[in-house]
Image: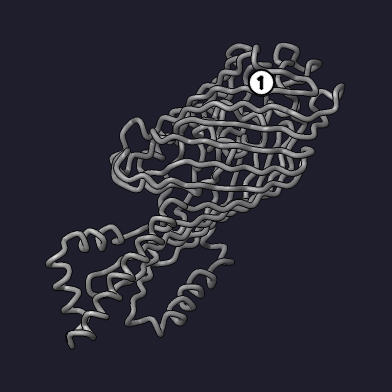
Amino acid sequence: MKKLVALLCLACLVGLSFAAKAPTHHSLRAEGMGNAHVAVVDDKEAIYFNYAGLSQINRLGNYKLRPETGYYPRNFGDMRLNLGGAGPFETYFSTFNEVKNLQGLYQRASQDAIAYGLSSMSVLMDSLANHPELMHMLHSYDHKPLGMRIKMDAELAFHGFGGAVWVDGSITPYLDGGLILPYMTIETFYVDGVMQGGVAYGFTDNLSVGIGGKIAKRQKVSRITMDVINYNSLQDTLEDRYHDATDEIFDFNSISAGMDLGVLYQLTREVRVGASLNDIYFKELAGDKITPNFTMGVNYSPRFFNKNSAYARKFNIACDYANMFYSENNYLPLSHLNFGLEVEQTVLAWPGYNNELRGLAVRLAGGFKGGYPTAGIGLEVLRFFTLDLVTWAEELGYYTGQDEERIYMAQISLGF
């Protein structure tokens, strides 16, 4: 135990000198409740947030093993395949309308130029000089981010052990109307691939610790700018960037290894506290020095609202102070505070099976992640098929509240 504490302290000191964020797995159950999950971790999400939570699988809700927490819905294990995608749909729709308006502006300038025997550019400049509202139209179109994401996961977790292989990818192009020359730029493009696994051990009925290892690979592509002039060479440009991204995809020298540590304590039968130090990478990842993620949190599951029967109910209220070491963008303390709640209710079941067989379960969640509201809904059918819809926001600016990007993600899961 003393060695574990010493290792945690050493990793904390090392993490203070690092800068970049580690590969991020978007767990939709957690994102819906504000990503406050380090002390919840009662299922496969323990793999990503706190390995110590693996000790709760097939224990919470088990009256024989732990009578004092037998009122929780029981979970034997998790084996899932997930596929999800996300994007800022509000930006898509607003950009589409602005593209139409901008197209109309250029078309009117071209028509007037033909009618009066002038150049289109001179007519456009005169129009902008006489009608400032048209300049506002161009500014609204300037630097429009259109981020898109995809995630794929294969997960396996049962009491005391869990592992996953997952991929998180993102591409963020933006459009610029350009007074002289409209263009499109792909600002960022990356793909993170991670394989990880870990174990949990309960020293007492109330205290458990977890440790895990991981290997990760990050593939990034440099900035790409495309305009009307190089339109004909666009295909060659994209092919060159594609080869840049794939030539070294199996280069094992670019793979980084890391570890995760976690602790969980059942303070009372309704209150758990947890802490984790994740993403302790031993070398740079694609040139990025990774900042370890140190998070502390608490979860409250009132017995009155929880029910372990055929029509099981789960109720959690959680609060985390997350990613304490990351402060690169002048983030305010609020950006590290996550808060959320969730309720999961079985609405179609076979009485007498105590949540072992259920036809339909619904999960509703809400909260705040870094000061921005989150919400989520999940539907589970026959314990095999699950559909999740979640929204949260991320900060694109230099301080909390400056530039919000709202993300909407959908995910389908197959497994037990």
Whether residue 123 is situated above or below residue 70 in the rendered picture:
below
Label 1 neighbourhood size at 10 Å, few (<14), some (14-19), many (20+)?
Answer: few
Residue at 56% in and 31% down:
365
Quarter occupied by the N terminus? top right
Most distant residue in the right direction: 352
Residue 2 visible in the picture: no
Quarter occupied by the C terminus? top right
Q: 142 left or right of 146?
A: left
Relative image position of residue 79 (x, y in whole percent): 74, 42
Q: Which of 270 and 233 is in front in this view?
A: 233
Rendering quarter of residue 102: bottom left
Q: 203 left or right of 31?
A: right
Q: Mark 1 points at which residue?
A: 203
Question: Does dot 1 land on a helix, a strand or a loop?
Answer: loop
Relative image position of residue 215 (x, y in whole percent): 58, 51
Residue at 60% in and 37% down:
377
Q: 401 left or right of 266?
A: left
State the colouring used for the structure image.
one colour
Most distant residue in the front direction: 115
Relative image position of residue 239 (x, y in whole percent): 49, 78
